[in-house]
Image (tube, rainbow, N blue to C red):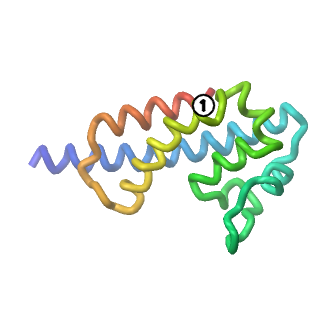
């Protein structure tokens, strides 16, 4: 029975960590854009959006992968690169978290490995800045 609770605990912890990461990404974007007197609406206006997709009108409407497009757009790069590093550096842990996020949010793997929990915790601290 304890194995069931451990699986449930890890899955729940992963879910909460993912939520916290998304909240922290929105705070990070808002905070650093404000420091540079750049409206978030301007960042959204210049971000890459796939053909046929609607441009998000608020940070809360972004898919997870779109945070990267906001932060590393032509307007966002000068704001976020000094804080988070180059896109190529930030992208590696971001993509790892995105894979974990997709597995958890789409219920692909209920037995979230401890290594995934550690990755989520570390990335949460990274975006808390």
Query: What's the residue at 41%, 58% (across, down)?
Result: 105
Measured as percent of width and height from the top left, residue 109 is found at: 28, 55
Expressed as whole percent of the image width and height from the top left, the position of residue 9 reads 28, 45
Please provide percent x and percent y for residue 115: 31, 34
- Residue 107 location (% of width, % of height): 33, 61
Instruction: Classify residue 72 as left or right of residue 93.
Output: right
On the picture, is 129 further left or further right than 7?
right
| Res. 84 image quadrant | top right
Q: Is residue 43 left or right of residue 11?
A: right
Secondary structure found at label 1: helix
Q: Would you identify the image quadrant in which residue 81 lies? A: top right
- Front in this rendered view, residue 71 or 59: 71
Q: Residues within 10 Å of mark 1 (few under 14, many from 20)?
A: few
Q: Is residue 50 left or right of residue 36?
A: left
Q: Residue at x 77, y 62 (%)?
A: 57
User: In the displayed structure, would residue 64 be above or below residue 57?
Assistant: above
- The quadrant the C terminus occupies is top right
Residue at (83, 57) in percent of width and height: 45
Residue located farthest toward the left when viewing the structure as drawn: 1
Figure label count: 1
Residue at the bottom extreme of this rendering: 52
At x 19%, y 47%, the residue is: 5
Q: Which residue is mark 1?
A: 128
């Amino acid at each position: 029975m304890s194995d069931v609770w451990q699986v449930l605990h890890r899955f729940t912890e992963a879910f909460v960590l993912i939520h916290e990461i998304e909240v922290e990404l929105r705070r990070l974007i808002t905070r650093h854009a404000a420091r540079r007197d750049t409206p978030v609406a301007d960042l959204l206006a210049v971000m890459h959006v796939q053909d046929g997709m609607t441009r998000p009108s608020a940070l809360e409407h972004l898919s997870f992968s779109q945070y990267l497009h906001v932060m590393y757009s032509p307007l966002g790069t000068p704001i976020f690169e000094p804080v988070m590093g180059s896109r190529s550096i930030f992208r590696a842990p971001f993509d790892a978290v995105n894979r974990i996020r997709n597995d958890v949010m789409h219920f692909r793997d209920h037995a979230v490995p401890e290594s995934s929990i550690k990755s989520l915790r570390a990335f949460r601290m990274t975006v808390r800045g």
